[in-house]
Amino acid sequence: MRWIPYFVAASAAAPWLAVMCSGTVVSGTAVAIMTGVAILGAAFLLSWACEVAEEDVPQALAVSVLALVAVLPEYAVDATFAWKAAHDPEQAAYAIANMTGGNRLMIGFGWVLVCVLNWAKFKRTQVTLARDVGGEVTILLAATLYALVPVWRGSLNLFDTAVYVTLYVLYLIAAARGDSSECEPVGPAAALAHQPPMVRRVGVLLLLVFGAGVIGVSAEPFAEALVETGKHFGVDEFVLVQWVAPLASESPEVVVATLMVLRGASHTGLRALISSSVNQWTLLVGTLAVVVSISSGHGASLPLDPRQQKEMLLTAAQCLFGIAVIADLRLELWQAGLLGGLFVIQPILPDWHLEIAFAYLALFVVVMAWDRRTRQGLGASVLTFWALLTNKPRPPVVEEAVTGIEG
């Protein structure tokens, strides 16, 4: 019974692989469904492989390599659109749509779900984070604030790549020097993790190869089919790419976080989702210009039209407010409700996205101005990140600030 999830996830790719190998011609809608399901199954396999691999891989290597694997499903779809954007400017909009949808889904739904489940199961009105989460908070804040630069400029270029990749590398260094406490794999990952070392390692390798292979042969047809389906049914392709594609790529991370909450590790589940947001805002966004440049054969940028600028601004504004509410190392139930409420109305009121973005920014300013613990928390996060980066103990003033926040 414990191996059934692996069988189901692997079998999810069977219909698409059969169609692809046989050369059968099917409708765009059918291709979108089959490739989407295949990517979803592969994403679960990669997620389980990442969990299990931490049993055998040194922490520093695990942080760097497994973070890349975790973002692969969404990156494959985004990279497909970015590659095509070099020759078809319309595709640039879809790359931004997928990126912004994934980021907003992670914060507006994932973070909220963790807090709501924590309350429903344990009657706790807040999720408390570990002290050294300051590394993630600091990098997420820096990456989000920098996102306002390409929004203002109207493009993502190779300079942005240099900034975002630098932030990602700094995050990896700090993460590798952070809390090394192990988290026991949960759900299907636990079945493989408890196998003899050789079986476990071979299993992880097979999952990684198979999952990456499925995503490799599914990402491009999935992206094309989504756009074709939108045009066929008269649905805005931008909206379809923004909300449907991330459902496949983000689901495993949300499911893993859910399992962590149900076993009483809500703080670990929330931190995993925060780390995912860091990966997306740095590695995923930062390398889009590289893909466009390689495809075009010269240094190029990914253009942002007014709609994409507005969507990216909304995503950055939501993230800033999210940072503000976790800066004091806790996410309160009412704060999660506010995050979730503002997220839910986004697809309902697409013409109000600019107003919603300003609402997020106003909330960020209000929280920063009136909540002393938030300001202390952000300051402590920056100093905690610097201590991790330089591999030195945190100054006493940070310990005092964090103790004050926790109190």
Image: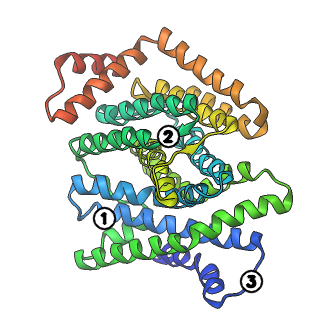
Inspect this view and state whether residue 407 appears: no
* Disc 3 from disc 2: Cα separation: 51 Å
Inspect this view and state whether residue 229 appears: yes
Tell which of 121 and 126 is nearer to you.
126
> What secondary structure is marked by label 3?
loop
Tell which of 309 and 50 is nearer to you.
309
The tag earlier along the polypeptide, 3 or 2, is 3
On screen, residue 234 above or below 266: below
- The residue tagged 1 is 53
Kind of residue indicated by mark 2: Phe
The tag earlier along the polypeptide, 1 or 3, is 3
On screen, residue 309 above or below 382: below
The disc placed on residue 303 is none
Tell which of 269 and 355 is nearer to you.
355
The tag earlier along the polypeptide, 2 or 1, is 1
The disc placed on residue 122 is 2
> What secondary structure is marked by label 2?
helix
Where's the C terminus, which quadrant? top left
Query: Can you tell which quarter of the image residue 404 is in?
Result: top left
* Disc 1 from disc 3: Cα separation: 39 Å
The disc placed on residue 25 is 3
On screen, residue 289 above or below 69: above
Kind of residue indicated by mark 1: Ala
